[in-house]
Amino acid sequence: MFPLQSNSLVFDDIPLFLEQDNVLEDLLADCAALEGNEHTADQVGVGKSASSAGGVQENKDEGKRAISDHVDQAVNYIKHMQKKIGEMKMRRDKLKRLSNSSGPTSDAEERNSDISGSSNCISVNVDVCQGGVEILISSSLNEGNLPLSKVLEDLLGRGLNVLSCVSTRADGQSVHKIQIEVNDLKSIDLAELQDRLANVIKQA
């Protein structure tokens, strides 16, 4: 089985064993390398997973903060608009009260001039009538105390033609209606005439 050569034993299979040992060592080395690579890959994978999870969590947190900011802005905007609407309603109600208390007024009423004193009130109103201009003077004074003659004198002194002058008294109030002839209404300023007559009565 074992040939003898030069008084020694020669093992023909030794090179084969050596070769198998080398292959085994190479396989062990490859396995070790593969195991190391897998471990490293696992570590990298775990790191990436942790990093990804952290990124996802961070993105979720940022998304929540963004949504919260939008909600806060919307709430503030709604509160601001509610305040504005409330102010507008208050203004509208105030205007309604003023409108109801004052009521509609005509041009003649707007031009009405009041002369108030401690014990009397005189009102002068000038308006257009058929054939000219009508002057109404209302007073709580006795007829003799009202300087009606001063009014007629002023009208005549300005070249106005007095057509009629009628006085009545009722309920403690004297009303004097004077009608003057005016051919061209554009030539006379009703507001100015009314203010001037009121000043005449006041200064008399």
Image: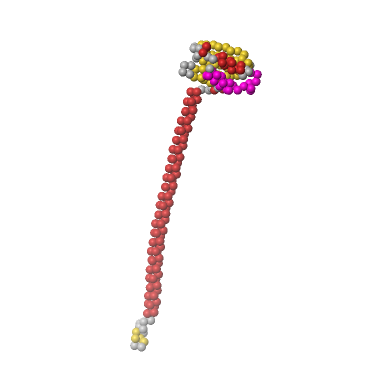
Q: Which residues lie in the magenta part?
A: 182-203
Rendering coords of residue 64 (x, y %): 42, 47
Q: Residue at x 41, y 57 (%)?
A: 51
* Residue 191 within the magenta-colored segment of the rendering: yes
Q: Is residue 31 above or below residue 13?
A: above
Q: Main secondary structure of the magenta part?
A: helix
* Residue 194 within the magenta-colored segment of the rendering: yes
Rendering coords of residue 193 (x, y %): 58, 21
Quarter of the rendering occupied by the N terminus: bottom left
Q: Is residue 119 above or below residue 75?
A: above
Q: Is residue 25 above or below residue 140?
A: below
**In the rendered picture of this protein, how many numbered marks are placed on residues?**
0
For the view shown, which residue lies furthest in the bottom direction?
A: 6
What colour scheme does the image use? Answer: secondary structure
Can residue 109 be seen in this snapshot?
A: no
Q: Residue at x 35, y 86 (%)?
A: 4
- Along the viewing direction, whichever of 69 and 42 lies nearer the viewer: 69
Q: Is residue 22 above or below residue 51?
A: below
Quarter-of-image position of residue 72 = top left
Can residue 65 be seen in this snapshot?
A: yes
Rendering coords of residue 76 (x, y %): 44, 40
Quarter-of-image position of residue 86 = top left
- Along the viewing direction, whichever of 81 and 176 lies nearer the viewer: 176
Rendering coords of residue 183 (x, y %): 65, 19
Left or right of 54? Residue 131 is right
